[in-house]
Amino acid sequence: MYQFLKLVFTYILPFFLLLNFWVLPAQSEFLLDDKVSEKIHFEFTSNLIIIPLEINSVELSFVLDTGVNKPILFNLLESDLLSLKDTETFFLHGLGGDGKIEALKSSHNEFKIGNAINTDQDLFVVFDKTINFTPRLGILVHGIIGYDVFKNFVVEINYNAKYIRLHKPEYFKPKTSKKCKTLPLNLYRGKAYIDGEVNINDAEKHVKLLIDTGSSDALWLFEDESEGFSPNKSMFFVDYLGKGLSGSVYGKRSKVNNFELGDFNMENVNVAFPDSVSIDLTKTFKGRNGSLGGDILKRFNLFFDYTNEKLHLKKNSFYKASFTYNNSGIVLEYNGNMFVEEQIKLPNSSNFTNSKRMDAVQINQSFNYIMTLKPVYEIVEIRTSSNAYKAGLRNGDVLLTINSKAAYNYKLQEISEILHGKTGKTIRVKIGRKGEDMVFKFKLDDVFKTNEPSN
């Protein structure tokens, strides 16, 4: 029996989204007929992979997230009509301090990724309107999917060319070049774990990490002073880390001297230590020390082979990029649209004659104005220790211009790159607050000069 649901869609952003439930795997799988592989292009923003996906013939966009077992659908566009089959109530746990949330479990749905089809797929639907992540991304995303893709294929992720390729395992042959390395994976309840080494506080530590393509950060470690896992006391700051299913997550940000993954060695790597309230439910795998996220994973082109529990990886052009922090202390999100009056040039032609050409057309330029919808960006988090806060910026301020350019002409990711600029760079902004326009100027921080708590 079909249950028809028409929902108002908001947006989704799992900067990290770790769901700690394990559902006994159904006997369903993605099938790829008449081909040995399928290439699917993705959008890449905030270190996240967003792939096109169809559910029951409705086109949607999902984050590809190795940190989740079953697909989760957060909302639907008001104009979309999804037929969900065999529904029942379920409860999910996720990062954040607010506990479990109610969801609808639906079985026997048809999923399609490129030409790969699963005609018997389970998914969860979350109706809580406060779970509204996509404004932080600035692009439309409907949900997350993970293990059900990785269990059926060798999944190639090419961050440079922005595509994934689904390889049938029986036809896949790993590359044998010296630049391509193979590392063992440990699969537990549909999630992949990998071993690494970190140098933290001048001590070498072995770590077992969840591979989490649904995390924007580089490295997360669970703070444990008795085991030597704690930030350098003179080099950390308290910050908003992101949003999970069960609420916002805060913690400490710092650096590790270096991080080793097999033969690959990265220096001065960003690390976050989430607060204990947020992570109590994530330690379900014995010996786990944290997570390996997109800011490291994007530096490699990857082949996930869950069948043989192996990861093949090769450095790409992102490998040598510096690990940066948001030196402004400002977190923005998309908050709807506004009408903006824009001047456009219109061609105005008039015939004229002269002694040389009898059919010449003279083109003049005239101007007209049109009203167009443009994005609105609002400050939703600001570090109280930041120069931006000290200059007077506050939560709820609407960004109008940044460095004399209209904010609506930027994508959210482009503004984020400006806010991740070098320490000491001057930023000038005009904001709207309670009907008034206000101008502020501040320099990007050295985030480690202070470790005052965030608001």
Image (cartoon, rainbow, N blue to C red):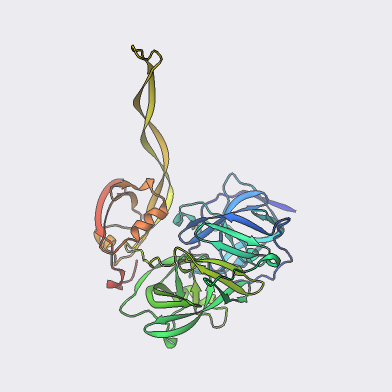
Q: Percent x, y for residue 49?
A: 53, 59
On screen, 248 above or below 357?
below
Looking at the picture, how far across and down is residue 352, in whole percent? 36, 14
Tell me where residue 422 sits by quadrant: bottom left
Q: Is residue 381 visible?
A: yes
Q: Is residue 374 left or right of residue 110?
A: left
Query: Is any atom of residue 274 visible in this view?
Result: no
**Where 8 falls versus 285 (above or below)?**
above
The x, y position of residue 264, in whole percent, is 47, 75
Residue 129 x/y as whole percent:
52, 56
Q: Is residue 447 above or below residue 374?
A: below
Nearest the camera: 308 or 391? 308
Residue 6 as seen in the image, left or right of residue 11: right
In the image, 82 versus 165, the foreground residue is 165
The number of callouts visible is 0
Q: In the drawing, does residue 82 fall left or right of residue 18?
A: right
Would residue 425 be found to the left or right of residue 99 on screen? left
Q: Is residue 259 above or below residue 111?
A: below
State the residue at coordinates (33%, 63%): 329
Residue furthest toward the front? 356
Quadrant where the C terminus is found in the figure: bottom left
Please name whichever residue, 386 or 165, is drawn nearer the observer in this view of the structure. 165
Residue 384 found in image quarter: bottom left
| Quarter assignment of residue 320 | bottom left
